[in-house]
Amino acid sequence: MAFYETLARISTDPIVGLLQLAGKDTSPNKLTAIIGSAADDAGNLIIPQAVIDSARELAEKGINMEYAPSTGLAGLAELMSLEFIGQKTCEELSKNGVLRAEIVTAAGTNAIATTLLACTGRDDEIITHNPHWAGYDSIVLGIDRKPLVNFDILDGQDNFNFEDFDSSIQLITSRNPKTKITILLNTPYDNPLGKDFGNTVWDRIAEILAKYKENEILLVIDTAYIDFGPTGKDYRRLSFLPSLFQKINSPNFNVVIAATVSKSFAMYGARVGVATLLTTNEQNANNWRDIAGGCIRGTFSNASRFGQEIAMDILKNPAKLANVHQFQEDSSKLISKRREVLLELISANLPEEFKIIKPDSGFFVSLKVSTHKYQDTTYANALYEKILASQLYMPMISNQFLRIPVCGLNESKLTQVITRLAQVAHSMTAKI
C-alpha cells in the first residue's frame, strides 16, 4: 500500500523546484534568474505607494482578524472584475445578454484551480498552450486531473498556431464527441513568451470554437500580466470578449477570467484574485458563487482578509488607483528598457541555437533552444544540464524554452546571465 495518492510534487515544478535547488547553492558564483516579480535596479520589489499607504492606514485603525467570507469581502469581487475586464467591456457584455458572476480567490493560481475544480471532472481533458507557465501542470496534478493536452502556440512564423489549436480540440473530441472542451490560455503578455496576439486572432479563435458549439465549452483566460503592456494599464485589452460571445453564439459557451492583484498591484504575498464567470446561461451564473465558493470552502476556507481590505481600499479610492496605474506604466517602461538591452546582448553573444521569441511586452523574454542536428529537445536538455552545472539557475520551460525574467534583473545582472549562458552555449556548440 502507498502512503501518497497524488502525483503533485513541488520538486517537479520547473520554477519552484529550481528555487529549491538554487537555495541549496551557497556559492558566491551562483547566478539566479528565476522569479517573475518586478524589482528595481537594486533588486527590491517595486511596491506602489498606494499599497503601502493603504496597508499602513488599515493597520493604524486596528487590523481586523475576523474571518473573511469564503466568497470574499462584499463588493470586492465586482470591483476587481471591473478593474480587470473594464467598465465599458462589462457594459457591452451585459447589453449582449452575457451575465457576470465573480468570486474572490487566493490570487490567480487559485482562480484557475478553483475554476477547474468546480467545472471539470477527472476524465475531462484540459487544453493549454506549449510553452506555458509550469504552474498549470502543478494545478492539474494538485486537483487530480489528467495531464494537460498541449498545442504549439507558435507557428513557423511565430504567429498564433490556429492549425495546432484546432487539432488539439479535434483530438479530444475524437476520443469523446460529447466531451466538455476546456481551454486554458494565458493572455495578454503570457508567461513565458510575452505575446499579445490581438483581436484579429480572437476572431479566428471564435470561428474555430463555433464549430464545436454543441459541446460544453469552458475557456479560462489567465490575465496575470494584463496590466504590463507597452503603456501599462489599458482597459481595452479584453475588448474582444463581446465579439467572442456573438460569434460563437451558444448557451454552451462560458468564459472565466482569472485575474490577480499579485502582479497588477505588486501584492505578491497578499494572495488576492478574482474568478469572473461570463456566460449566457442564467443557471450557470446563479450557481457560480455557491459552487466555486464551496470549492474554496472545502480547500483553504477563505482568502486573507487584510489583503482583500487593501485591494478594496485602493479600488474605491480614485487617487490611490491612479497611483497603482502609474506604477504599472513606470514598471512597464523599466522592463521595456531592460528588454531592449537583453535582446541586444542575446544577438551579440549567443549562437544560432538560440532563437529569440520576441515578446510584445510582459515580464519575460524566452529563447527557443534547438539545433539543425537535433530538432527535438535532445540538445536543449543537454545544454540545460550544463547551464545548471555552471551555477546559472534559470527555468527551462517545456524542455525547450529558456525564460529570462527581465522584470526583476537590472542591466548588469542581465549582462552576467547572458555572458555565462554564452560560455556554456559555445562550449556545447563546439561539440555538435
Image (cartoon, rainbow, N blue to C red):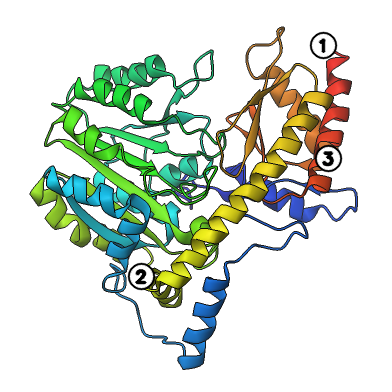
Residue 245, percent across and down? 20, 35
Res 85 visible: yes
Where is the C terminus found, in terms of image quarters?
top right
C-beta proximity under 8 Å, tags 1 and 3: no
Question: Could you tell me the amino acid type at mark 2?
Answer: Asn
251 relative position to 66: left or right: left
The residue located at (20%, 51%) in the rendering is: 91
Q: CA distance from mark 2 to mark 1?
A: 54 Å
Q: Nearer the viewer, mark 1 or mark 3?
A: 3
Judge whether 172 appears above or below 335 on screen. above
Which residue, given by chain and number where applicable, does mark 2 sit on? 302
Circle 1 residue:
432
Identity of the residue furthest to the top in this view: 373
- The answer to whether mark 2 and mark 1 are in CB contact below 8 A is no
Q: Residues within 10 Å of mark 1 (few under 14, many from 20)?
A: few
Q: Which residue is mark 3?
A: 415
Residue drawn at x 51%, y 91% is 60
